[in-house]
């Protein structure tokens, strides 16, 4: 085996690479013709038609509309009678709305509430107070969102917030249940 110092210092390449490098650098110079990339290449394939920002915006709005429509179809609505809003200052009537989860969710929630009731009694008082405060906050938020949905039942953001409240409540209940195991 030869030592590194015994190797020749200058070895000429089999071919000169510099002309290709110079051409690539020159292609990036301002004003130089560049090969089509991305949307420009797509426009060439489509016979010169190029999607404009307006088309992109229309496609995005269409996707959002379909998402909202699918979301509204997946939330079952329990019918509730109209309830007059408190106040004689001419406030509009508010409808009490409840977006009822399915029966399986209700059974699971009731089961967790029973288990958590027994486990809460075994927790240290400071921990119990924090858990009860968390549950109360989630339940108050859910009631506020349901009241707001009564005034604006088609509001997709409120519907999503309500589902998130249900999930938050289930997270708290599940965590408390697992603490005691």
Image: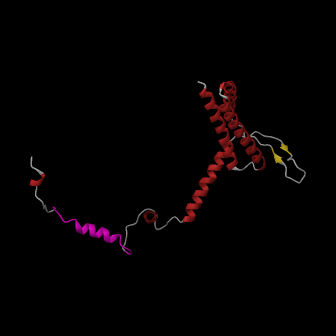
Q: Nearer the viewer, residue 26 or 117?
A: 117
**Residue in the picture at 27% in, 70% down:** 22
Where does residue 33 sit, x and y in percent of width and height?
37, 72
Residue 3 lies left or right of residue 115; in this view the side is left
Where does residue 77 sit, x and y in percent of width and height?
73, 41
Image quadrant of residue 109?
top right
Where does residue 47 sit, x and y in percent of width and height?
46, 66
**Residue in the picture at 72% in, 37% down:** 136
Q: Nearer the viewer, residue 67 or 6?
A: 6
**Residue in the picture at 80% in, 40% down:** 80
Q: How many marks?
A: 0
**Residue 90 located within the stretch drawn in magenta:** no
**Residue in the picture at 71% in, 40% down:** 137
Q: Is residue 170 above or below residue 19?
A: above
Q: Magenta residues?
A: 13-31
Q: Is residue 154 above or below residue 50?
A: above
């Amino acid at each position: 085996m030869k030592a590194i110092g015994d190797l020749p210092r200058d070895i000429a390449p089999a071919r000169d690479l510099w002309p290709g490098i110079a051409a690539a650098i020159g292609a990036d110079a301002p004003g130089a013709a560049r090969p089509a990339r991305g949307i420009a290449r797509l426009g060439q394939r489509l016979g010169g038609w190029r999607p404009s920002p307006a088309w992109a915006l229309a496609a995005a709005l269409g996707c959002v509309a379909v998402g909202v429509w699918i979301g509204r179809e997946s939330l079952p609505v329990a019918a509730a009678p109209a309830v007059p809003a408190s106040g004689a200052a001419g406030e509009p009537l508010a409808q009490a709305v409840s977006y009822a989860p399915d029966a399986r969710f209700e059974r699971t929630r009731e089961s967790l509430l029973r288990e958590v009731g027994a486990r809460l009694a075994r927790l240290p008082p400071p921990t119990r107070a924090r858990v009860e405060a968390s549950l109360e906050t989630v339940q108050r938020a859910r009631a506020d969102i349901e009241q707001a949905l009564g005034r604006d039942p088609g509001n997709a953001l409120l519907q999503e917030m309500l589902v998130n409240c249900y999930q938050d409540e289930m997270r708290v209940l599940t965590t408390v249940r697992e603490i005691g195991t």
